[in-house]
Image: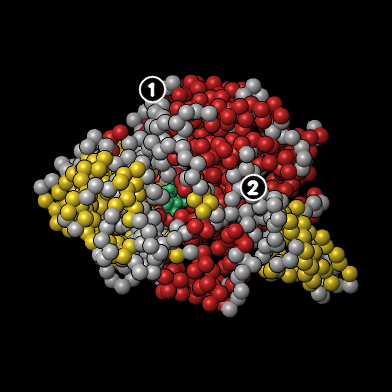
Amino acid sequence: MKEATPQTIYLKDYTPFGWQVDSVHLTFKLAPEATRVTSRIRFTPDPAAPAQDFFLHGEELTLIRAAVDGVAVTPEVTPEGLRCAVPNGPFLWEAEVEIAPASNTALEGLYMSNGMYCTQCEAEGFRKITYYPDRPDVMSVFTVRIEGAEPVKLSNGNPGASGDGFAEWHDPWPKPAYLFALVAGDLVNHPDSFTTMSGRQVELNIWVRPGDEGKCAWGMESLKKSMTWDEEVYGREYDLDIFNIVAVDDFNMGAMENKGLNVFNSSAVLASPETSTDANFERIEAIIAHEYFHNWTGNRITCRDWFQLCLKEGLTVFRDSQFTSDMRSAEVKRISDVIDLRARQFPEDQGPLSHPVRPESFQEINNFYTATVYEKGAEVIGMLKRLVGDEAYAKALDLYFARHDGQACTIEDWLRVFEDTTGRDLSQFKRWYSQSGTPHLKVAESYADGSYTLTFTQHTPPTPGQSDKAPQVLPIAVGLLNPNGDEVVPTTVLEMTEAEQSFTFEGLAAKPVPSILRGFSAPVVLDRSSSPEERAFLLAHDTDAFNRWEANRDLAREGLVAMITEGAAPDEAWLDGLQKVIADEALDPAFRALMMGGPSQSELAQVLHGRGITPDPEAIWTASETLRDAKARRWAGLLPRLADEAAVTAPFSPDAEQAGKRALGGAVLSLQTRIDGGAAAEAQFKAADNMTLQLTALSCLVSAGRDEAALGVFERQWSGDRLVMDKWFALQIAATTPDKAVERAEALTRHPAFDMKNPNRFRATLGGLAMHHAGFHRRDGAGYRLLADWLIRLDAVNPQTTARMCTVFQTWKRYDPDRQALIRAELERIAARPGLSRDVTEMVTRMLS
Ligand code: BES
Ligand code: ZN
């Protein structure tokens, strides 16, 4: 395991590697405890690079032999790599190392999952396979030979010779080592093919364990849609003869874009109507697209160094969200993305882990695959597109691909293609990449003689390491409505660049109602205390679906805050106004389902904290429950009609239309359960022929406390299906009452099917607990203690997943002194563990500082 080292890497220290790698030949002789990896690598000195020692990364490798130009050498080996004397000119490096994939529980490098060999090399896992300059700016052409009895042996690129016990692969596209992949095992494939826009035939395969063949069709559909979309929208064509996807049960992340050989967490690719929810289908579609899109944004054009991670991830998230918007409802996708941004990125940016979209330093790069790099990184691209316009965006992207194909690039390169196509100066815009924290935007308005002025002020609170903030460029999309509800000024983008700035609209017959930040045009906190009447007006009349949803969310939030802090009753007038929207059959059921939900309890805690009020998780829970009860009572007459409307009679399809209906049906059932105690849920549970209906019903039964029988039935039905059992673990914690969440999670860790080595199962159980706001934040600290116990255990097995899960403590300073003391004690207990990984050490230190 990597030892905790306090070493910090800085962006400003970047230096190019001293050699070019002309070619890489790798041979793998597979064996679970003693795999031999032989490398033959041709190096040529790079005259442009500064003089340096010849250093190759390598971790947890046993060096068997090494040679330079055929002559044996004895390099100086350290835990991080090796140094060796080499000739002044080009030379051939050869090495043989031994590794033990079967004992690799960290799931980085070459490891085993259910008897199958697989690799995960991003970000710095290749150094656990062989000695190599493991950095993204070193790109080379790889040829791979795999020897072993496994029937299926895959690597990147196109297949070469194969025969008894061996298979060869050649990838003609130069790539960094983090995109290397190898898979070998007893696998079966779901085959298909695709003809690219220039008429090339590409063989497509999804490889799975025997038994999972029936769960590949949706992934394959999604892949073909992604390939077509990238051709049509970005003009990007696939560039190999074959594209392989492999499903792996033990995987730290969702999926990985290795060139020509994407490796997926089985939860992110396997799907069937009986075992997968609509949300699963939608996620699979998006994640297949995301990894496929990386072929151009990440693989053909990669990152110079890991500080530039948002260059590929922010852009690829932006592209996959465009794809989902095109495949489904753009409005619903935008609302869902903003919900996610506020739930994951805002807490990060407003807490101790805040960092810029392009960080300036790190200790462990795995800790920077964050919501800020990904989701805020994608928001920044959305703002750029809004500012330059769709046409200029398309031109800039064409230039990006033309200019930088085959290169390892920086954010400067990215912004320059926009400057060169538009003539704009993006130096101020670049602050979005360097300045951390969420800007707060205040609005004042004035109206006189037909002239209406909006005055905006922006302010970004200080974040760790950054006390003085400069104004950001904010595209503020605004529309104006007449008091009668007509739109008088359609969506207009105001470009704010100053700390305070006014914009005037002329020729208005009456004082308009503004609809500000339409489509959530900038990732800011809009501090606008408008009246409930104005919000209700926008809820009824706004033409912008996002702001309609937002007006309702503002009303819901203010109502809940009043309930929590003043003991107010639920706002019946608001519920009546909302009922009209929910009842409106002209609106998309998916949108109406979103309108029925409220802000999450964690988000309410953040809101209260932002207003200087210490959040009490129990009070937040109670208020949220009271509000749901009030909705159920107030809308009781409407619910049966909505349930009818939501019923799907056609054969199951995971498309947006059916999924929207089921989402509405689910929201209705959860309210109905508050009235009938679970009778309707029980009927739905018994009759369900797809996982969405079955799981919503089970969730309702658990929250109604009528779950004993149903949980048992479900477990017996699905005990053979790993992915469904993950849902069973997560759901019974998520849907229970705060007093039971910790005990349930604890009991589940003793269930025979609990396996801490499987990240999905660990996340379902302990992550499930952390997601239960009031349950996790139980006053006596039992939730914190249980989680910390398990994080300590998991760190010795899998530091990367442990470090990710530690972030659930990042909001600890929101809470009261007693809870803070309890959390601090747990963080300090973790920090004090001897042999704690570098990953977790960095996270815990940042959260405590
Ligand atoms: N390149 C990442 C996978 C990755 C992340 C590897 C962290 C190593 C460390 C991949 O493209 C990715 O971003 N996957 C996401 C899903 C995506 C839809 C945002 C994931 O795995 O969660
Ligand atoms: Zn990605």
Q: 298 or 360: which is nearer to us?
A: 360
Q: 656 or 137: which is nearer to us?
A: 137
Mark 1 surroundings: few (<14), some (14-19) or many (≥20) residues within 10 A: few
Give the quadrant of the C terminus: top right
Q: Where is residue 46 in the image (x, y as percent from the top left)?
A: 34, 66
Tell me which residue sits at (40%, 32%) in the image: 797
Circle 2: element type: loop
Position of residue 127 relative to residue 811, above or below, is below
Residue 262 visible in the displayed image = no
Tell me which residue sits at (77%, 37%) in the image: 613
Q: Give the residue at mark 2.
A: 464
Q: Where is residue 56 in the image (x, y as percent from the top left)?
A: 33, 52
Q: Give the residue at mark 1.
A: 752
Task: Specify the quadrant of the image occupied by residue 785.
Answer: top right
Which amino acid is tagged 2?
Answer: Pro
Mark 2 surroundings: few (<14), some (14-19) or many (≥20) residues within 10 A: some
Q: Judge: label 2 CB < 8 Å from ligand 1.
A: no
> Exactly how many numbered labels are in the figure?
2
Give the quadrant of the N terminus: top left
Q: Is residue 222 left or right of residue 632?
A: left
Which amino acid is tagged 1?
Answer: Pro
Circle 1: element type: loop
Q: Position of residue 739 (x, y in %)?
A: 61, 22
Tell me which residue sits at (30%, 57%) in the image: 260
